[in-house]
Amino acid sequence: MSAARSRAARDLFVGFKPQATLGDWLRGVEKLYAKAGATLGQVAASAHDEALYLLLRTLELPLDSDESVLKKKLTAAERTKVETVFRRRLVEHVPAGYLTHEAWLGEHRFYVDERVIIPRSYFLEIIPEQLDGWLPDPKKVTHVVDVCTGSGCLAILLAKHFPKAAVDAVDLSPEALEVAAINVKAHRLGKRVTLHRSDVFAAVPAVKYDVILSNPPYEPSEHCDALPAEFKREPRLALDGGGDGLDIIRKLLRQARTRLQPHGIVMIEVGGLRAVMDREFAALDLHWLHTGDGSDCVCVVNAARLKNWRG
Ligand SMILES: C[S@@+](CC[C@H](N)C(=O)[O-])C[C@H]1O[C@@H](n2cnc3c(N)ncnc32)[C@H](O)[C@@H]1O
C-alpha cells in the first residue's frame, strides 16, 4: 500500500465517536463515499443504499430490517469489522459485491467474486415483462441459451422463467464458469442448466434455440482503459468488446443464424452502443426494448430477419 493510501486508511474514521449508533455510521460513511471518490453503479445507485447494505451485511443483520435498527449501538468488535469493510471499499475501491460475495437481481441472490462481473443486467426486467411477447407460444419453449453467462445469473433467471426448458450457459472464461457452477447448484438447477466453455457458439453442441440471450462484453477497449478503479477490478474479459465494442456481438449475430428455430429470437444488451448498433446492423432493423430507466439498450431480432442478412 502506498504511503498516501496508508494515511487515508488510517485517518478515514477520524471524528467517528465510539458510542456512535448504526444510523450515525450510516450518515458518516455516506459522506466518505464522495470524499473518497468511490464509484457506484455495481451494487447500488446511491452511497446511502450501498452503505446501508454493507453495514447490515457486515453486522449480519437482515436486509429488510426496519428503521429501529439505526438506533443500535455498535460494540467494539463490530466497529472493527465495519471499519475493515469500509477501508477496503473506500480506500482500496473494492466493489461492495466482492466484499459480501453476493449480488442481487431482484429477489434472486447470486454468489460472486473477482472471477465474474457483478450482475446488474436489464434482463432482470426484460425476461419477466417482455420476453414472452416475442414468442408464438412461451409454454412450448424447450431450448434457451445464455451466451456470455458470467456468474450464470441470466441462465438461472431463464430457467426459472421457462420451467420446462433446457438452458445452455456459455462462457469463454473457465473461472467464470466455476462461479456459474456454484450458482446453478445453489439454485438447484443442475438438471436443466448446462455450462459450456466456448468462444460464443464454437464449442456448443448443435442445438436450435427458441431464445438466444446475451449480455456480452460491449465496452470499446479505450473505455475499459479509462474505467474507475471499482470497474477495473472486474474481469477485463467481461467488459472489453474490442476496438468499437462490437467484437463479440458481431460474432454472436453471425453464428446465431444457424442456431435459431424458425420462430426463434436473439436478445442482446448493448449498454451505450445503441446508435453504433443501428448503423452497423441497419439491415437487421433492430427493435429496441423499453427499459425502466429509459436507456432502452436491449435489442431483439428474429430468425427470419437474421436468415436473410448478409453480414
Ligand atoms: C458482461 S459479462 C455478463 C455476465 C452475465 N451474463 C451478467 O449479465 O452478469 C460478459 C461475459 O462474457 C464472457 N465472454 C467474453 N468473451 C466471450 C466469448 N468470446 N465467448 C463467450 N463468453 C465470453 C466473459 O467472460 C463474461 O463472463
Image (spheres, rainbow, N blue to C red):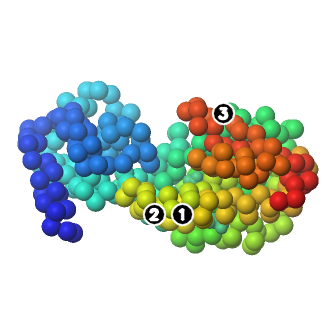
User: Is any atom of residue 215 visible in this view?
Assistant: yes
* Residue 91 point in image, percent of width and height: 25, 56
- Cβ of mark 1 under 8 Å from ligand 1: the answer is no
Amino acid on which the number 3 mark rests in the picture: His
Query: Distance between the Cα atoms at labels 2 and 3?
Result: 30 Å
Q: What residue is shown with label 2? A: 225
User: Seen in the image, is 16 located left or right of residue 256?
Assistant: left
Q: Nearer the viewer, residue 218 or 78?
A: 218
Eye-nearest disc, 3 or 1: 1
Picture quarter containing residue 288? top right
Q: Residues within 10 Å of mark 2 (few under 14, many from 20)?
A: few
How packed mark 3 is, by other alpha carbons closer than 10 Å (few <14, some 14-19, many 20 or more), is: some
The image quarter containing residue 249 is: bottom right
Count of marks, rendered view: 3
* Dot label at residue 290: 3
Cα separation, mark 1 vs mark 2, equals 7 Å
Where does the image place residue 197, in percent across and percent down from the top left?
66, 71
Classify 102 as above or below 44. below
Locate the N terminus by quadrant. Answer: bottom left
Q: Residue at 53% of width from left, 70% of height from top? A: 175
Secondary structure found at label 2:
helix
The residue type indicated by label 1 comes to Ser
- Location of mark 1 (residue): 221
Residue at screen point 58% across, 70% down: 173
Q: Secondary structure at mark 1?
A: helix
Residue found farthest to the front: 279
**Which quadrant is the C terminus positioned in?**
bottom right
Which residue is at 63% across, 69% downward?
172
Residue at disc 3, secondary structure: loop
Cβ atoms at labels 1 and 2 below 8 Å apart:
yes
Q: Amino acid at mark 2?
A: Asp
